[in-house]
Amino acid sequence: KLALVSGDIYNRKFCNNYRFWTDTQRKLCINYGDLIPKVSVGARIAYDECIHQFRWRRWNCSAHAPNSLWTTDSKNYPSLFGNRLIMESKEAAFISALFSAGVVYSVTKACSSNQLQSCSCDVRDTKDDSRGYRWHRCNDNVNFGVTFSKQFIDSVELNWSLERMYSSHARSLMNLHNNDVGRKTIESNMKLKCACHGVSGACTSRICSREIPDFRFIGNVLKRKFDAAIKVKLKYISTRQVLMPAMKYSPPVTNTQLVYLKNSPLYCSSVTGRRCRQKKGESGSCNAMCCGRGYRTKERTVVKNCNCQFIWCCRITCQKCT
């Protein structure tokens, strides 16, 4: 989904010659060169979070992630997340939302540092509002992060060709929808952080700021959306093509729900050699993870320090426990 490059020099010649980028991405590279490394950082944050969220699932996001390049070439995309990933599946929906959110997060954090030429923190009026809050002069600039992420990532789906229009229009609509879900997840979970000021501890005034949440929190929210994702299909309403729930009489899809077009495979062939949990019913249990094909158990003795005591002065003694 992303065209990313690591490096420090982002000049016009480089931006125009990079063949995997869309025209919009090249223009953003030229106009906001110091943000391109932040896009790469956001993608890496998202990839690591994906591995964390699916660490006890059969499909666990893991494959060989290139160190310096993330391409829009569809032939390379499956190799990043495993060759069995279906591009219209729930897992692909999660990836779209998570990577879109990752770019928002990284760009917003970078802008808030006030160390870039392309953007700065969100400067608000410091006057008191109706709730009695006095806003901090510098808030996390999530609006800029959302706008940049939308332009950079969505341009991949909006880069139409006649062949693509007829072969993958439904998938593009799905990706655009899920990209937006990722961005909205950050927007709707911005934190209000306030500090009290006053004589002798009295809270006579509060200085507040809006801060972007930790990305682990965003990953947890999107994981819950993944578990509740809606299967959709392409329908015509008048002359418009829209995504509607595949099941009859289902309510319309909202802009906070992840959507997918095709069911996922079982991913049973990708679990060989993986660790699992022996306790039944919990995430990553051996029965579920191994598709009922059996598993091997290994016992090992772990020696740890225990019953530690501090002896004056100045050492600690411990026993060895197994």
Image (cartoon, rainbow, N blue to C red):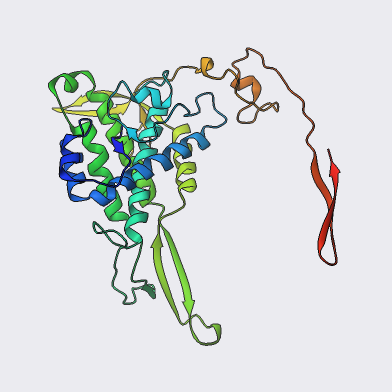
The foreground one among 75 and 277 is 75
Numbered disc total: 0
Would you identify the image quadrant in which residue 293 lies? top right
Where is the C terminus found, in terms of image quarters?
A: top right
Left or right: 75 in relation to 30: right
Residue 62, image x, y percentages = 48, 28
The foreground one among 209 and 270 is 270
Residue 301, above or below 207:
above
Would you identify the image quadrant in which residue 192 lies? bottom left
Residue 161, image x, y percentages = 14, 24
Residue 287, image x, y percentages = 64, 20
Residue extending furthest toward the bottom: 199
Residue 176, above or below 214:
above
The foreground one among 70 and 9 is 9
Residue 247 visible within the image: no
Residue 14, above or below 117:
above
Residue 106, image x, y percentages = 37, 49
Residue 85, above or below 306:
above
Left or right: 201 in relation to 229: right
The residue shown at (44%, 40%) is 222
Residue extending furthest toward the top: 293
Residue 227 visible within the image: yes
Where is the N terminus found, in terms of image quarters?
A: top left
